Every structure is written in structure tokens, then in C-alpha cells.
Image (cartoon, helix red, strand yellow):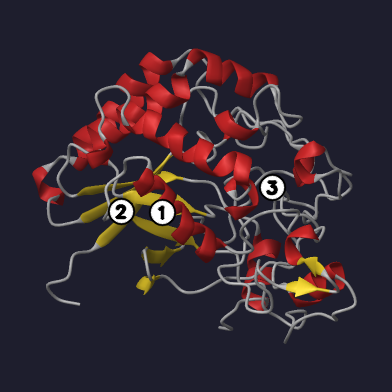
Amino acid sequence: AAGRPLVVQLVIYNLPGRDCAALASNGELGPTEIDRYKSQYIDPIAAILGDSKYASLRIVTTVEIDSLPNLVTNVTPRATATPQCDVMKANGNYVKGVGYALNHLGAVSNVYNYVDAGHHGWIGWDDNFNASAQMFKQAATAEGSTVDKVHGFIVNTANYGATKESNFTVNDNVAGRSVRESKWVDWNRYVDEQSFAQAFRQQAVSVGFKSDIGMLIDTSRNGWGGTARPAGPGAQTSVDTYVDGGRYDRRIHLGNWCNQAGAGLGERPRSAPATGIDAYVWMKPPGESDGASKEIPNDQGKGFDRMCDPTYTGNPRNNNNLSGALANAPLSGDWFSAQFQELLKNAYPAL
């Protein structure tokens, strides 16, 4: 509409040692190349965004997906630790890189930085929740940055968690047991992205972020519509039949993230959909592959991650379950037509 600022979404995603807990989207920079990240990546982006011809745009940056939460959940002594994440925690380059990016991009008056805050099936457990907020505060105050450079956080980026699970809540009890005891919820405090985002916003404020920060939820692939969408709660035989029968998110396990079968487009992007939520956004372009389902030689530094292989039987990060990934997927970032067609078919709200 005339007179309203045009919003431009940018993903800042090139940290040294990127994606330390996975292989599908490893980046170009090695673990120690923090100086290259600053001078050859962030500085040129900041210079472009600061050009006066872009002053009328509202530029939203999603800062470094899948980075800082890994320093909480995928490091020693956790069972989910990887050697690569231990290296990135020890050398501090995720924290330094995010701080530098926030500081230099946030110096442009029409740039709004949102830090990636994982999703409820990653950060929603008690031992991850506050620890992640503290880690984000550390990064937001590194390399000359301050919390004033953080406009908010984004959750569910390129992931599949349902925005709202309407058929059960974390407070429900069935057959004498809490829903939190179900295999699916597994003692998490949150069952969907919106309740997690709203609670995490308050947690971030409590550790020192500004009281007016807002949250974004990536709804590009979390619709879970189509014929298999439950119309109501599951049978109250047990907590598992109740949750599994009623949940919209039909992944085999919350830890599954690669090209998930059965997913659909989620809520269309819109502003201020709920308290504390600045917008629903489509940050991950629907139809863009999360990773190849088998090894494909490439010159982009992208590895083969078994979580993208439909025959893979899992690891501690998905509790040794099948990956739930679609077959015949191309490299991460490449167009995946079969997935796009499935997203359209299973869209909710329907197209």
C-alpha cells in the first residue's frame, strides 16, 4: 500500500564453521576464518544496506541460523555433542561473528536484526531454555554490539514445528499422566512454536534484552494440512494415543529437520498475528531443499547428511528414529519440485 514501508528479508548465514551439528549446509569458511567473515562478508553487506538509496526500505535480517543454540545443546558433555561444535564453542567464533554482524548491520538505522533462536523442539527443554537466552545475550554484547542492536528473535527457521497445536496443551493430563510424559513431547515445556516464542521472548527480556523486542515465526513449511490433518484430539487411552492422534506436526520425531515428508505450506505471512509476535514470515523459500538424500559431489562445501536420507535410522539427536526425509532430494538450497508440490497439496490454511 502507498506510504507503507517495503519489508526486505535477508538471511545472514555464513559463519566460520557453519552448521557444526550437521553436514548438509556446511559453509565456505573454516572454523578459524573469523577475519574473512568480518571483512569479506559482513562489511560489504553493511556497506550495501547503508546506501542512502535504500533508506526507505525496512530491512529485516535473520542473523545466523543454526548457530548459537548448537553451543548449548551440541557440545560436550551432551550425548548430542559433535567435535565441530566443541571447536566453535572453544574458539568463540560463533559468538564473535554474531556480535560483529549485529553491531555493524544494526548501525544502519533501517535495519532490524532478528537473531535465530532455534525452535521449541530444540530449545524448549528446561536445560536449554535459559542457557540459550544467556548465550544470545553473550553474543549480542560481543564485538562492540549491545542489546539495542537486537530487534527480536526468529523461531522455526527452515523448520517444521506447528505454529499452534489446537488439540492438546502441555498442561493436559490423560489416563493419570501428563502430556509431557508422552514420547512426542518428552518433557518439553512447549508443544508448538507460538507458545515457545512468546515464552522465550519473556525469557530474553529477563536476561537483559529490551522489553519491546518481538518474535518472528517461520511458517513456510509448518502447515501440516491435507487429508491426514487430525480433526480433533486423539483417543484418551494413553498420553501417547492422545498426543499422536491429535498433533498436526506429523514428523516421526521432533528432531527431524530435513525435507520432511507430509509437510505443507503454513500460515501466510502477516504482521502482528499474536501477542509478542511481530509477524509470521516465510524465511525459508518453499521448495528449496534442506539437503541431498544421497551423496552428490559439489564445489559448494556441502556434505552429505544422513538425516536427509529416507533410509537412515537416526542418531541421539532424533532419538534413533527414521529421518522422515523425502527421497531424491537435491543439494541444500537447490529447487526440489516434488517437495514444492507436496507443500502445495498439504497447505494449511489450504490454498
Give the image quarter of residue 6.
bottom left
Taking the image as drawn, is residue 220 in sight?
A: yes
Local packing at callout 1 (Cα closer than 10 Å; few below 14, some 14-19, many 20+) is many
**Along the line of sight, the residue nearer the viewer: 298 or 333:** 333
- Left/right of residue 33 with respect to residue 42 in the rendered view: right
Which quadrant is home to the N terminus?
bottom left
Distance between the Cα atoms at labels 2 and 1?
A: 7 Å
Nearest the eye: 116 or 47: 116
Of residues 179 and 104, the one nearer the viewer is 179
Does 109 appear above or below 265?
Answer: above
Q: Let me know if residue 13 appears in the view.
A: no
Residue drawn where x is 74% and y is 34% of the image:
304
The three-letter code of the residue at mark 2 reads Ile
Residue 213, numbered circle: 2
Residue that carries the numbered disc 3 in the rendered image: 330
User: Which of disc 2 and disc 3 is earlier in sequence?
Assistant: 2
At numbered mark 2, what does the secondary structure look like: helix, strand or loop? Answer: loop
Q: Earlier in the sequence, mark 3 or mark 1?
A: 1
Mark 3: which amino acid? Pro
Mark 3 closeness class: few <14, some 14–19, many ≥20 residues within 10 Å: many
Assign a secondary structure to mark 3. Answer: loop
Residue underneath mark 1: 201
**Mark nearer the N terminus (2 vs 1):** 1
Q: Residue at x 52, y 25 (%)?
A: 28
In the image, residue 336 sits, relative to residue 294, either above or below, namely below
